[in-house]
Amino acid sequence: MKVWLTGGGGFIGSNVVRAGLDAGHEVLTTAATFTPPAGAGYAVDHLDMTNEAAVRASIEAFAPDLVINCAIMNDWGQMYGDREAAWAAYVEATRHSSAGAADVGATYVLVSTDWVFDGTQAGAHEETPPNPINFYGALKLASEMVALERGGAVARVSGVNGLHLARPTTIRAQDRGFGYFVASIVDALEVGETFTVWEAPEINMRSTPSLALECGEIMLMIGDKQADGVFHCCGADSVTRRELAELTCKVFDLDASLLRYGPPDPDSLMAAPIPHDSSLTTPRTQRVLGHAPTPVLELLQRFRLQREAEHPGQATHEIKDT
């Protein structure tokens, strides 16, 4: 299968690239500035995702079987500071890439988020009506509508953890969501540092964790089946931040006494409300793809194996105050 994707230099995108290569697929990713190391095994097309002609020309030239749109504007200050640019980066980029997929008859997958829900819709399934409470969620929901109306698929991810395969270190220690949470704990505790698990009503306190690499594998399943509609790419278990931290210590053989619990860093404040409970369930995903969600302990065990294979005997995070 030929896979064309956006954002291969990002966290989720780099894992989609790896999943594609591991499965023997030919992969091309777009990027603004990212360039992979020599011999990486995949191609990169540097283009502006808001340029419709360039996007459609790139897809037409590669002639993929599957198009996956992973790229996002990941800076909330930029997003809120220039909403027109944010709309173009999310919604118009979805419009352009989905049109390009239609041009060549490729299956289309938009990567979306559990933050299309408001934080009171615990255990949301694929047909639960979304209700975003911030601009990011609204942008993703608008993008979902574009993708679905063009006959594409939506792959919502939740509490994504794993390795950023395009960067040598974890890019941040903790945020008000669940991203990078496990890696941050492991990086701190394995060198004897304490780690404060944030707990507060105004942050994302419960999620259904996933592993970035497995998310990529599920997206490839969607392509294999040429499926459409909404899918939830997440594990089997809804957990709190504290529960996930304690499970991480168990799986990675870390000293749980180094964990601390307290309010978030004031400097981490985001520009809008955040869903408190963004947990998902997966009935349609199981039915259509035949994929049973992975228990959180198994996801953490797989993450440990992946981390040890990628960085044997080394911490991979530049420790920051937590």
Image (cartoon, grey):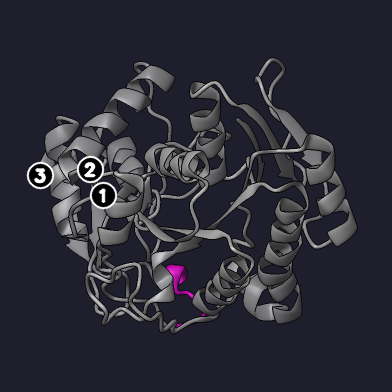
Q: Which mark is residue 235?
A: 1
The residue that appears at 43% across and 21% down in the rendered structure is: 310
The residue that appears at 38% across and 18% down in the rendered structure is: 309
Q: Is residue 322 visible?
A: no
Q: Is residue 217 left or right of residue 263?
A: right
Label 3 sits on a secondary structure element that is helix
Residue flagged by tag 2: what amino acid is it? Thr
Q: Is residue 169 above or below residue 67?
A: above
For the N terminus, the image quarter is top right
User: Do tag 3 and tag 2 residues touch (Cβ < 8 Å)?
Assistant: no
The percent coordinates of residue 2 (x first, y second) are 65, 32
User: Do tag 2 and tag 1 residues touch (Cβ < 8 Å)?
Assistant: yes
Q: Quadrant of residue 129?
A: bottom left
Residue under circle 3?
Answer: 257
* Distance of label 3 from label 1 (alpha carbons): 27 Å
Total numbered badges shown on the rendered structure? 3
For the C terminus, the image quarter is bottom left
Secondary structure mostly taken by the magenta-highlighted segment of the chain? loop
The percent coordinates of residue 167 (x first, y second) are 56, 35
Label 1 sits on a secondary structure element that is loop
Which region of the structure is painted magenta?
267-272
Q: Earlier in the sequence, mark 2 or mark 1?
A: 1
